[in-house]
Each structure stands twice: as C-alpha cells, then as structure tokens.
C-alpha cells in the first residue's frame, strides 16, 4: 500500500516547514529519516528510526497542525512508532513509506509561492551589536534599527547613501539578521545590484521569469545594495520598479543603498525620488577622529590583537578615508607584526606597516606607469623629463633620476633591465645601484622620507 496523493502532499509540507523552521542539522537528523505510514481518522502515524527521536518529535505538534490545516484542511494529530512498538498491521507500510519518501520530492506539487527556496545571502557577521555608532552614521543607524523593529512601517523604503567602506552593506545585513532573529520565517533577501542584474538577465534568457518574480515579489524584506550599478540597464530598472511596486503595495520592506543621493542617479532619479518621498533617505559620512578611534578599539577587540592606544591614535590620524581602510590597516599591522615577530606594535612598526600598505595600494589601485612616475619626480625636483633620461650627470639631475628609478621599482612590477631601458637604455646594474643608494638613505634621512610621501601622494 502506498501513500495517497494527499498524504504525500501533507508529508512534503511537513518537511518543508521543518526545514525552514528548525534549521538544517535538526532537519537532517530527526526529520529526514522519519516516515509517514498513513493518516487515518485525522491521525498521522509516523515511523521513527530510533526511540531517541521520540522526544524531539513529541514537540513538533505545530508542524503537523500547520501542514494539516494547509494541505488537508483538518486538525491532524499524530502518533509515533519505532521498530519496537509498531503495530504489526503497519509493518508493510514501513517498506512502502521508504519508497514513497524517495518519490515525494519528485511527485509532490504542493509548493506555495512563499515556499520557493530562498537564498537570502545574508552575512551573519554584520549585526547591530558590532556596528560602532558615530557622528557620521548616527541617524542612519537609528533608521536601520527602526526598520528592523517595524519592517514595512514608517521608513519604507529606506534609502542609505554614502561613500565606499562606510558601513552601508553592514547595516543592511544587520537589518536582515535582526528581522530573521525575531521572525525566522520572514522571506529576507540581500542582493547586490550586480547580482540582481545577473539574476534578471539569466532568468530572461532561460525563460524563467516566473521563478524570478516568484522569488523577488514574494519577499518580506528586500535589501538591494549599490543601486548605482543599474545605470544604463533599462530592462533591469523597469523590472526593479515593478518588483518595488509589488513589494511596497503589500507592505514589504525595501532597503536600498547607493554611493550617491537619489537625485544624482540620473537615469532613474525621477522614478526613485518620487518613491522615496514615501520613506526615508539618509546618508553616512566618513568617521571623525574620535569615531575612528572607537572603531579601531572595537576592531582590535574583535581581532584579538594587542595594540597600544598611542599606535591606534597614530592610525586614526593617518587613515581618515573610511572604515574599510581602517580595518585593512589593522589587518596589515597584524600581518606585519606576525611576519617580523614584532612583540609590541609601536608607532614605528605601524608606520612601516602602513607605508608598505600604501605602496601596495598605489600599485594595485592605479595602473601607475613609469612615465607618470618620471614626470612627477621631475616636477617635484624642478628638472625636465628629458634631462632625467639623458646621460647628464650633475647631482641635481642624477639624484632625482635615482629617486625615480627607486620609485618605479617599488610601485610597479617592472624588472631592473626594463627600468634601465626607460632611462635612456641604461644597464640594469645602474638601476640596482640607485635602488640600494636610495633605500639606505630612506632609513635615516627624514627630509627624503617626507619628499617620498609627497611624491607618492601626488601620484594618487
Ligand atoms: N560603524 C562601523 N562599525 C563597525 N564596523 C564598520 C562600521 N562601518 C563600517 N564597518 C566595517 O567596514 C567594512 C566596510 O563596510 P561596508 O562593506 O558595509 O561598506 P559599504 O558602505 O557598503 O561600502 P561599499 O559602498 O564600498 O560597498 C565592513 O567590514 C564593515 O563591517
């Protein structure tokens, strides 16, 4: 005897609810191995692999009741059996149920829209509790907490804008995590605009727009990061606004982030600003010195590294761009201290580590060319580039030439012979000599250190 179609649907629904509500491990351990034997007189007979599972199952009345009402429209109770206490009349059902449960996932058709599998992609390390409040983010943090407490309420949609690395993604994830912690069933999705575009394009290409709309338009919370990425993507923009309207109409919460205010999102500025009149637009600005100190103190705690406060204060005064750079500086510091076995990370060590980071950044961020470096160094020492690459040897030309060679070696990955070529076809040993001379001088000559700093910052 096999299960009826209704029994199959009921059992599939029980499993789906369990998977959504209980988490993967309890599901794998307790729910998956269980078998529905039959439903008679509104009682579901469930066979358990071992008696150890019984206590867990006794607490699952909600699952059974919910699935019962949803699928069968009846109040379903349940009885639990194991190999030791199974009624002999049910023996043959155990075998049949094993086959049925293998078939269940293929045959069951009872999947409501709200059960479409959802990858929410939230990063659970981003929470409100590890977000440091400061002057630049106070209002946005307040709005984010309000949204998490009352999704779909006053601040819908919430539009957060600000420069890179200031915590927009962190806050959006914190909203999602907070909502899921109070309501694990909420349909929450965090998506970068880039992935939204990819999802949309893939779904249209594969003729799977129904899946796309099922996924996006049934959400309770949509967190869309970096909307400026939609620029020039008219199809995606239209799809997004339809999603937006559907969600907003049904009271779902929408949170959007951008690197600029809505008014500066030219192509869809009008459509956005009209909708943002309904909600709240708020910005995050770069942290001031005190806030940078607070963030650093928090991060050294998180990273479990020991850094004296004067070193932190040095970092906070040197790095004023954003929080991501502050984090990067600390990571670099830790790496430097581990590599060179430095016990105390004093200001000196921090300066060295940050110099290395800056050189690296310069090289990776800007595709910096030798000619740009030659030009900048020549400008700084007030000589011409032509003189710099000539055979002339007076000190006021030879010295900047050595500096330019040193910097090209440091900031690009050019080989010694390649650099020699760029200075009028000089031999690689000349470049090597320049490099060693300037390195030596850099260790003691504070005037030269300052000059290097200025040249490098002009190169940015
Ligand atoms: N106030 C803060 N407190 C603690 N950590 C922060 C804070 N602001 C930012 N961060 C951290 O800085 C890093 C960068 O933040 P995030 O990725 O959220 O920036 P973003 O504004 O989304 O940047 P982008 O626009 O480049 O995507 C993250 O690791 C985040 O946890």
Image (spheres, rainbow, N blue to C red):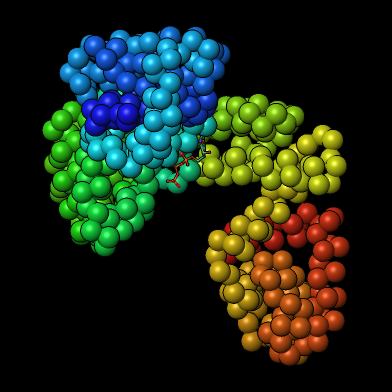
Question: Is residue 335 found left or right of 239 in the rendered image?
Answer: right
**Is residue 356 visible to the viewer in this orientation of the structure?**
yes
Question: Is residue 124 found left or right of 205 in the rendered image?
Answer: right
Q: Is residue 421 above or below residue 371?
A: below
Q: Nearer the viewer, residue 289 or 345?
A: 345
- Image coordinates of residue 411 in percent, x first then y, are 67, 66
Q: Which of the image's four quarters has the N terminus? A: top left
Q: Is residue 375 above or below residue 146?
A: below
Residue at coordinates 27% horizontally, 26% vertically from top-left? 7
- Image coordinates of residue 427 in percent, x first then y, are 81, 87
Q: Nearer the viewer, residue 329 or 43?
A: 43
**Is residue 458 visible to the viewer in this orientation of the structure?**
no
Q: Is residue 370 above or below residue 136?
A: below
Q: How many marks?
A: 0
- Image coordinates of residue 362 in percent, x first then y, are 60, 60
State which quadrant residue 273 falls in: top left
Residue at coordinates 42% horizontally, 12% vertically from top-left? 87
Q: Which of the image's four quarters has the C terminus? A: bottom right
Residue at coordinates 61% horizontally, 31% vertically from top-left? 299
- Image coordinates of residue 295 in percent, x first then y, are 57, 30
Residue at coordinates 24% horizontally, 38% vertically from top-left? 109
């Amino acid at each position: 005897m096999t299960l009826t179609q209704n029994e199959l649907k009921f059992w599939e629904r029980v499993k789906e609810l369990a998977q959504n509500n209980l988490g993967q491990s309890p599901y794998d351990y307790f729910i998956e191995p269980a078998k529905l034997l039959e439903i008679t007189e509104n009682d579901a007979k469930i066979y358990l692999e071992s008696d150890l599972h019984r206590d867990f199952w006794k607490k699952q009345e909600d699952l059974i009741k919910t699935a019962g009402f949803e699928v069968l429209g009846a109040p379903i109770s349940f009885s639990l059996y194991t190999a030791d206490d199974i009624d002999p009349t049910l023996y043959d059902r155990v075998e049949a149920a094993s086959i049925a449960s293998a078939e269940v996932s293929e045959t069951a058709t009872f999947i409501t829209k709200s059960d479409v599998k959802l990858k929410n992609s939230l990063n659970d390390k981003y929470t409100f509790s590890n977000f440091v409040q400061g002057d630049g983010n106070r209002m946005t943090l307040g709005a984010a907490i309000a949204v998490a407490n009352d999704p779909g309420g006053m601040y819908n949609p919430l539009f957060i804008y600000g420069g890179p690395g200031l915590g927009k993604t962190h806050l959006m994830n914190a909203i999602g995590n907070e909502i899921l912690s109070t309501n694990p069933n909420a349909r929450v999705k965090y998506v970068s605009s880039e992935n939204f575009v990819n999802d949309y394009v893939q779904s249209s290409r594969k003729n799977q727009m129904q899946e796309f709309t099922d996924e996006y338009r049934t959400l309770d919370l949509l967190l869309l990061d970096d909307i400026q990425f939609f620029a020039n993507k008219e199809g995606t923009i239209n799809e997004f606004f339809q999603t937006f309207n559907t969600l907003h109409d049904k009271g779902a919460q929408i949170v959007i982030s951008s690197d600029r205010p809505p008014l500066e999102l030219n192509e869809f500025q009008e459509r956005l600003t009209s909708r943002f009149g309904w909600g709240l637009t708020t910005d995050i600005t770069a942290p001031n010195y005190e806030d940078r100190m607070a963030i650093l103190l928090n991060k050294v705690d998180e990273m479990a590294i020991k850094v004296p406060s004067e070193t932190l204060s040095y970092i906070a005064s040197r790095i004023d761009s954003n929080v991501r750079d502050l984090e990067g500086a600390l990571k670099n510091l830790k790496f430097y201290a581990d590599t060179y076995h430095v016990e105390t990370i004093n200001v000196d060590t921090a300066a060295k580590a940050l110099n290395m980071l800056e050189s690296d950044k310069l090289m990776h961020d800007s595709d910096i060319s030798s000619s740009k470096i030659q030009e900048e160094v020549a400008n700084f020492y007030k000589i011409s580039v032509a003189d710099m690459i000539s055979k002339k040897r007076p000190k006021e030309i030879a010295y900047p030439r050595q500096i330019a060679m040193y910097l090209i070696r440091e900031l690009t990955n050019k080989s010694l012979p390649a650099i020699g070529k760029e200075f009028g076809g000089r031999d690689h040993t000349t470049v090597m000599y320049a490099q060693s001379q300037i390195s030596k001088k850099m260790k003691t000559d504070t005037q030269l250190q300052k000059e290097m700093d200025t040249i490098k910052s002009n190169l940015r």
